Image (cartoon, helix red, strand yellow):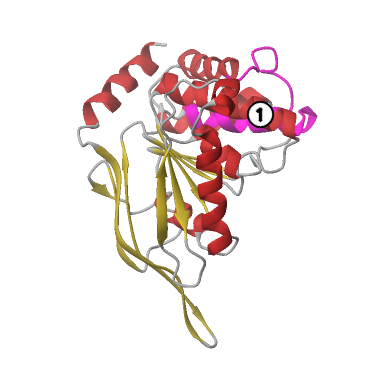
Amino acid sequence: MEVLEKYEVDIAESVSNENMLEIKELVKIYPTPKGEYVVLDGLNLNIKNEEIISVIGHSGCGKTTLLSMIAGLNPISGGEIALNGSPIKGPGPDRGVIFQSPSLLPWMTALENVMLGVKEVFPHATKKQQADICKYYLSKVGLGDSFDKKARDLSQGMQQRVGIARAFALKPKMLLLDEPFGMLDSLTRGELQDLLLEVLNKEKITAMIITHDVDESIFLADRVIMMTSGPRATIGDTLQIEIPRPRNRKEVLEHPEYYNYREYLINFLEGH
């Protein structure tokens, strides 16, 4: 794991600002036959190093648009986004993205799917070093005995685990997750929420999670960002979750503030 350790040192040295992500007066406009459609208008947001935030809001409020612009997959119309002090100009390995569907190559094994990105991020590593990185993260997500299984032969939950391993194996500064557990059954969803928190804590990675689930937003996040409805959506409110990490699901549900947090978020959504 020599290459991995060196990369971790490089990342630690490069992270000097208190804020990992800074968004200032962000605007997103799409042209339509009837004129401009303003999706996001004047959105401001700072995310601290190692902070986990969740973003909630009604469908169409621009949550996924916001995430795709941070990922560098969607150009901004105005304002700016900076990651660790540097303006975002396109996609890069410093931002890992996990979507609702992991989009694996079905004819490749779990190991080969993770290896695709690792070869790009660690091009000077030996094949063994690259494989060790892949195996390390696949083992972390509970797939230590499934390296050589074809993606098409894995369950939906296992495929999403491969997607999570693939994202973490790139050693991103920030992880962006768009409804990552939305297609899973409740039991698998809970298992992967626990897994995600465990790995985020260990790897000390900053994360933004898009979700429609109020309970998921409270369980996973240090802070919940509430979006107003579109068009011209922006941040309507934020809620600090004063539950220390690492978190235990039972302890979170029994926390004296849990239902107050829940009621606050639901009231916001009902009012917007």
SS category of the residue bearing label 1:
helix
Please name whichever residue, 198 or 127, is drawn nearer the observer in this view of the structure: 198
Q: Is residue 151 magenta?
A: yes
The range drawn in magenta is 141-168
Q: Residue at x 46, y 26 (%)?
A: 200
Please identify the quarter of the rendering in which residue 174 is found: top left
Is residue 205 visible in the rendered structure shown here? yes
Question: Does 64 appear above or below 155?
Answer: below
Please identify the quarter of the rendering in which residue 57 is found: bottom right
Left or right: 79 as drawn, with respect to 127? left
Q: Residue at x 23, y 36 (%)?
A: 18
Left or right: 254 as drawn, with respect to 43? right
Please name whichever residue, 213 or 62, is drawn nearer the observer in this view of the structure: 213
Residue linked to disc 1: 190
Question: Does 188 appear above or below 40?
Answer: above
Q: Is residue 18 magenta?
A: no
Could you say where residue 160 lies in the image, as x and y percent from the top left?
A: 65, 33
Which amino acid does the dot numbered 1 rest on?
A: Gly
Could you say where residue 89 lies in the image, as x and y percent from the top left?
A: 33, 54
Could you say where residue 106 lies in the image, as x and y percent from the top left?
A: 73, 36
